Image: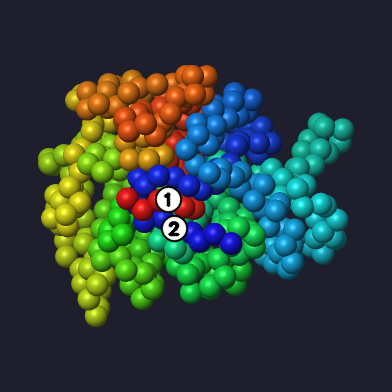
Amino acid sequence: MTQLSVYSEIGRLRAVAVHSPGLEVDRMTPSLMHELLFDDILFGKEAREEHDVFSKVIAKVADDVYDVQEMLATSLGQEGARRHFLDRFCVLHQLQSADRDRLEALDDRTLAELSVAGWYEDIDQGTRYRFRFPPVPNLLFMRDPAAVIGNGVSLNHMATNARRAEPFILDTVMRFHPKYRIDDESRIWFDAIPGYLSGLPELNNTIEGGDILVLSQDILAIGVSIRTTQSAVTMLAEKLRAQEKFKTLFAVLMPHERAVMHLDTIFTQIDREHCLVFPPFFCKGIDSLPVIKMDLSGPKLEITLKDNFLSALADEGHALKPILCGGKNRLDQEREQWTDGANAFCLAPGVILGYSRNLKTANELEKVGYNVVSGEEVLAKDIDLLDGKRYLVMISGNELSRARGGARCMTFPLRRDPI
Ligand SMILES: NC(=O)NCCC[C@H](N)C(=O)O
């Protein structure tokens, strides 16, 4: 078994889970898409091709790149896992025992696939259809249903019904996967599953991984957003205080808007000294976001209000120079933030992945020394991304970005090297 270990956003990536968009995306209909949190119906074939380049580039640096659906299938094969999963999944979807029997009869891979793709049935020779349980198209955004923090995990309580099946998949993976399971219950920082099962989900305590950023061994930043509540952040802070050695948690108070649904849609750390930001919220001015600083090191949780996140970080010895998503003009900033220009995924300090359509952002990165290359080029020329230079690897994301998530959103890091 390998220990989970995430103490930064930028340390060299060793193990990560992603999920290539499958049948669940091909089954999206116009009438379902808004409820399922997509802004369009995706062309699955192209989305898979984009995702394939993305995961192959990641595999040039990381030792283990898993698809979570595969992880689920592997986990289901472990003793007790199938029962654990089905007990919970059938309650979630209110399935009767006959339906459960049909699921029991499936092999591990088919059960894992069906759990993600939804249980679809044609009726009247295909003139109508129904889902016994719905597809899970947002599993592509692996960042959100769970988050490794230090050497434990948070099984998140999703804010929307469309995403509530996802933590159930991660729950089985994190408890049964032969390589990455958690044996020690006390290292599950947050567990949404019992609330769902009791029928009394703690409605005010939602939290999603896109809001959770582990900046260093000492510092966490968590967005209080349209998806993550202040009370969930406080619960997590109390749990971590008792178990981990983080000293400070910054709760960044965000506007409740879809465009900025998580903290990582407006801020990602990309190097020891750089972060990518949506400028209006971080550069001093009227839109600058306030932050609650929680001191985790004292005998009780001490709280102070700060008026600017970047200066509060600098005061803690974590100074970051902001690189402007979209460049200097507000119009470009808004356009590129919408297509996840501020949402980069870091493979190692200064080695990042982002969508190729965000040209103004790429230009800003180039100015401070990032070599801009395409994913295809990295693969064809076998470019060594760990040769000490800075890289922005651009991934085509014209299909993927229409599901409203970027490179960081599509990853669930399990292990990073210390920095
Ligand atoms: N971390 C992220 O910002 N994830 C993007 C999630 C997009 C997804 N369609 C959602 O609305 O939840």
Above or below for 294 versus 33? below
- Is residue 69 toward the left or the right of residue 216 in the image? right
Residue under the point 67% across and 65% down: 88
Residue 107 coordinates in the image, percent (x, y): 81, 52
Residue 393 coordinates in the image, percent (x, y): 41, 27
Image quadrant occupied by the N terminus: bottom right
Q: Residue 328, labelled with which disc?
A: none
Quadrant of residue 125 in the image?
Answer: top right
Q: Secondary structure at mark 1?
A: strand
Label 1 beta carbon less than 8 Å to ligand 1: no
Q: Secondary structure at mark 2?
A: loop
Residue 244 coordinates in the image, percent (x, y): 36, 69
Q: Residue 416, labelled with which disc?
A: 1
Residue under the point 64% across and 51% down: 71
Mark 2 = which residue? 5
Dot 1: within a 10 Å radius of its alpha carbon, few (fewer than 14), some, or many (20 or more) residues? many
Q: What residue type is disc 2 on? A: Ser
Residue under the point 69% across and 43% down: 117
Dot 2: within a 10 Å radius of its alpha carbon, few (fewer than 14), some, or many (20 or more) residues? many
CB of mark 1 within 8 Å of CB of mark 2? Answer: yes
322 or 216: which is nearer to us? Answer: 216
Above or below for 41 versus 121? above
- The answer for how far apart the CA atoms under marks 1 and 2 are is 6 Å
